[in-house]
Image (spheres, grey):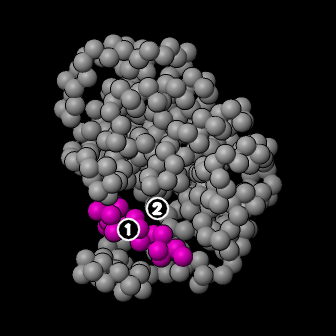
Amino acid sequence: MIAEMPRYGMTLPLTGLPLHAHADAVRELSDLGYTDLWSSEGPGYDGFTPLALAAAWAPEPRLGTAICPVFTRGPALLASSAASLAAAAPGRFVLGIGTSSDVIVERWNGIPFEKPYARTRDTLRFLRSALAGEKVDEEYETFAVRGFRLGVALDEPPKLMVAALREGMLRLAGRHSDGAILNWLSADDVATVAPIVKQFGSDREIVARIFVCPDPDAERVRAMGRRAASAYLHVPVYAAFHEWLGRGELLAGAWKSWREGDRKRSLELLPDRVVDDLIVHGPPEACREHIARYVANGVDTVVLQVMGDVDPLQAARGGPGGG
């Protein structure tokens, strides 16, 4: 069973702080009561290095990737990377995997973004066997692994979680992994998404990356938030997600202008309501109340990503143990 008390985490690295200078910040986050530290993987740091450093700097927080794409590392390398971090932080590493997007996979890495659901399913099956120390000699639908055995003995394999948007991947997460990692959704959306995962067991964990800007200037946050949200909402997998959630009519104008190449007009047409739904903002107390709605609707682990011209460590001091 998932603990009744929610877990609260922060995203590493903290914006504006060099990676090598995180030691004191990581220890302070732990002292403040943050139970988790999660990384992401895109155009910046890789998903494992910040967590490996954090494992040495603070022995308490759980560490997780949100997420590592299943396309950009080969299966064996992904298993080896996960095993290395699980060995560095025994019992407190969670490997979050997912499809990522055609932008990261195809445009940035030159890898065909084909059969993403099947690739994630196959990767999960491989990782379950490999991280358990089994020899893998298997022809999966999307790749084959011949005669691989992990050369790292783990007392406890890491938990595996899946980044999920729509129903198919949410069911995959619930059926075949330890839970789902959610991204760019509102507190109310959680009530739609979480039950699809939880139907496979109340112990399935729901982790949500939540974007927060504790700034009372709503117009300033919305101007920043439009740009940040737009970077995701026009990616096909996220566009389909938000259409499924019922935002198709709200976003139709912005999508149309984007397709026509008018990016400025597309930003202008992104409704305030959408930005307010997807980005937690306002005075700190209002942010805490908004985050609590995510928890009430089914989030077990909150992972905060502080946005805007806000010192993320200063913002964190108003969190679990400092608010």
Q: Quadrant of residue 235?
A: bottom left
SS at circle 2: loop
Q: Would residue 144 be counted in the magenta stretch?
A: no
Cα–Cα span, label 1 and label 2: 11 Å
Region in magenta: 224-245
Front-lying residue, 90 or 14 = 14
Position of residue 86 relative to residue 73, above or below, is above
Question: How far across and down, in percent of the image, does residue 214 sit?
Answer: 68, 69
Quarter placement of the C terminus: bottom right
Q: Quadrant of residue 148?
A: top left
Front-lying residue, 103 or 127 = 103
Residue behind mark 2: 185
Mark 1 Cα-neighbour bin, 10 Å: few <14, some 14–19, many ≥20: many
Q: Is residue 63 left or right of residue 172?
A: right
Dominant SS of magenta comes to helix
Front-lying residue, 48 or 296 = 48
Q: Which mark is residue 233?
A: 1
